Image (cartoon, rainbow, N blue to C red):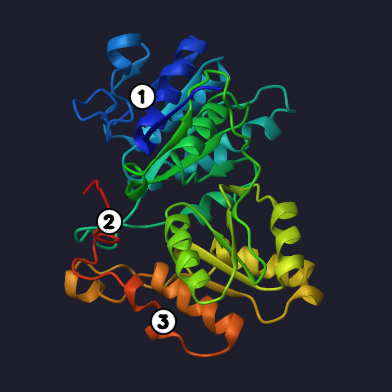
C-alpha cells in the first residue's frame, strides 16, 4: 500500500482524478470547477485531462444546477456538483430534499440517485452572517441523504471516492480551514473509506470527546494539553453525521463515563445535541457526570472583527471544559497557551491557510 503526504485539497483532487478514470459516468460541474484557481486546487487538472464535456462551469442558478444533477444521476451518470459556499446552496434545498433524497423511495426503489454534492463552509475575515454558516444539521435531518464531514486528507480522499460510487445522494462537507492540512494519503485507486463509520483517533480512559470536521484539529490540540495535566481523553472523529456510528460512540462512552460533543454548528438542534440526547438515553447508567456540548451561540455571526472576538470555541475552550468535567474545578490558567493570540479570524499562528 503506497502512501504520500499531501494536503486535504490534494487528497480531494486525487480522488476526483481516480474516480473519473475508473468510470466515464463520473462528471464534475459547478461554479468555478474550471477556474484557474480550481476551487482551492481541488479540481486542478480535471478539465485538461477529461475534457469540457465532463468538467464544466455552470450559471449561478443553484436550484437549476442541482436539478441537472438529479436528472443526470437517474439517467445513469455519477455527477459531482461543487458549491464554493454552503450558504449559496440554500437556494437548492427544494431539489435536494424533495427530489434527490426522496426519489429512491417514491418510485419503489427502482432507481437510485448516485449524486455527490461538495459543499464548503468555514469562517474568517469578516464573512458575516450569510457567508459563515455551518448548517450540516439541516442535511442530517433529511431521510435519504448521507452526510459526511471528513477531517483528514486521507479520509477526504477515501470518503469522496466512496461518495461518488455510492448509489445514494451524499452531501460531502469540507471546512475551508482543512484544505491545507497535511497528512499521509493512500494512493491506491481502489481505496475507499466507509461512509458510516466513526474513527477513534486517540484512546483515553477519562472522557470521550466527539468532534467533527475542523473541530477534530482543535480536539487533538486540547487532548495533548490535557494529558500534560493528568487527563487522558479519548477522541472520536465522527466523520459521518448521517448515519452516525452509534456503536463506536456508545462503546467509548460506556468505558469512559463522560462525554463532550464538539460541533461547528449552532447549539440548538445541532449534531452535538443529537449525540448528547442519544447517549443520555442509551448510556445513562454509565455516565459519571452530565454530558456536555460545545457549539456556536444561537446568533448570526457578526461581520465586525471586534464583535467576533470571544465568539468562537477551540482547543482552549475544549480543554477548559473537559478539565472541569473530570476534576471539577476551574482550570483557565492551565490552558492559557491554547488561546488564540493575535488575529482570531484564523485558528492560530500554526495555521497555513487559505484565507
The residue that mark 1 highlights is 29
How many neighbours does mark 3 have within 10 angstroms: few (below 14), some (14-19), or many (20 or more)?
some
Residue at mark 3 to residue at mark 2: CA–CA distance: 20 Å
Left or right: residue 178 versus residue 305 is: right
The residue that mark 2 highlights is 350
- For this rendering, which residue is in front, 48 or 184? 184
Q: Is residue 250 visible?
A: yes
Secondary structure beneath dot 2 equals loop
- For this rendering, which residue is in front, 167 or 19? 19
Label 3 or label 1, whichever comes before in sequence order: 1
Which quadrant of the rendered structure holds the N terminus? Answer: top right
- For this rendering, which residue is in front, 4 or 297? 4
For image coordinates 34% across by 53% down, the residue present is 122
Secondary structure beneath dot 1 equals strand
For image coordinates 43% across by 32% down, the residue present is 66
Disc 3 to disc 2: CB gap under 8 Å: no
Left or right: residue 226 versus residue 131 is: right
> In the image, residue 75 lies at what x, y percent?
55, 15
350 up-or-down from 300: above or below: above
Secondary structure beneath dot 3 equals helix
Q: Is residue 51 visible?
A: no
> In the image, residue 339 lies at what x, y percent?
32, 73
- For this rendering, which residue is in front, 320 or 91? 320
Amino acid at each position: 500500500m503506497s502512501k504520500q503526504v499531501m494536503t486535504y485539497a490534494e487528497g480531494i483532487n486525487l480522488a476526483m482524478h481516480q474516480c473519473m478514470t475508473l468510470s466515464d459516468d463520473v462528471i464534475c460541474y459547478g461554479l468555478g470547477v474550471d477556474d484557474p484557481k480550481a476551487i482551492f486546487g481541488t479540481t486542478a487538472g480535471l478539465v485538461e485531462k477529461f475534457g469540457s464535456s465532463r468538467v464544466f462551469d455552470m450559471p449561478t442558478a443553484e436550484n437549476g444546477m442541482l436539478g441537472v444533477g438529479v436528472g443526470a444521476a437517474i439517467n445513469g451518470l455519477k455527477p459531482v456538483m461543487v458549491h464554493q459556499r454552503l450558504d449559496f446552496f440554500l437556494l437548492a434545498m427544494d431539489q435536494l430534499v424533495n427530489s434527490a433524497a426522496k426519489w429512491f423511495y417514491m418510485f419503489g426503489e427502482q432507481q437510485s440517485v448516485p449524486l455527490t454534492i461538495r459543499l464548503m463552509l468555514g469562517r474568517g475575515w469578516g464573512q458575516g452572517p450569510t457567508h459563515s454558516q455551518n448548517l450540516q444539521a439541516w442535511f442530517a435531518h433529511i431521510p435519504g441523504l448521507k452526510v459526511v464531514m471528513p477531517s483528514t486528507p486521507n479520509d477526504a480522499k477515501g470518503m469522496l471516492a466512496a461518495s461518488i460510487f455510492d448509489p445514494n445522494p451524499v452531501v460531502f462537507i469540507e471546512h475551508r480551514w482543512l484544505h491545507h492540512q497535511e497528512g499521509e494519503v493512500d494512493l491506491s485507486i481502489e481505496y475507499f473509506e466507509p461512509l458510516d463509520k466513526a474513527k477513534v483517533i486517540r484512546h483515553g480512559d477519562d472522557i470521550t470527546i466527539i468532534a467533527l470536521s475542523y473541530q477534530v484539529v482543535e480536539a487533538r490540540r486540547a487532548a495533548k494539553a490535557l494529558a500534560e495535566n493528568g487527563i487522558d481523553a479519548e477522541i472520536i472523529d465522527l466523520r459521518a453525521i448521517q448515519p452516525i456510528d452509534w456503536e463506536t460512540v456508545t462503546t467509548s462512552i460506556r468505558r469512559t463515563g463522560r462525554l463532550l460533543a464538539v460541533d461547528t454548528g449552532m447549539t440548538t438542534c445541532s449534531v452535538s445535541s443529537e449525540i448528547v440526547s442519544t447517549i443520555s438515553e442509551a448510556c445513562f447508567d454509565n455516565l459519571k457526570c452530565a454530558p456536555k456540548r460545545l457549539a456556536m451561540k444561537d446568533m448570526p455571526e457578526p461581520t465586525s472583527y471586534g464583535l467576533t472576538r470571544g465568539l468562537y470555541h477551540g482547543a482552549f475552550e475544549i480543554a477548559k471544559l473537559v478539565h472541569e468535567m473530570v476534576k471539577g474545578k476551574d482550570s483557565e490558567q492551565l490552558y492559557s497557551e491554547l488561546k488564540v493570540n493575535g488575529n482570531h479570524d484564523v485558528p492560530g499562528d500554526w495555521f497555513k491557510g487559505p484565507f
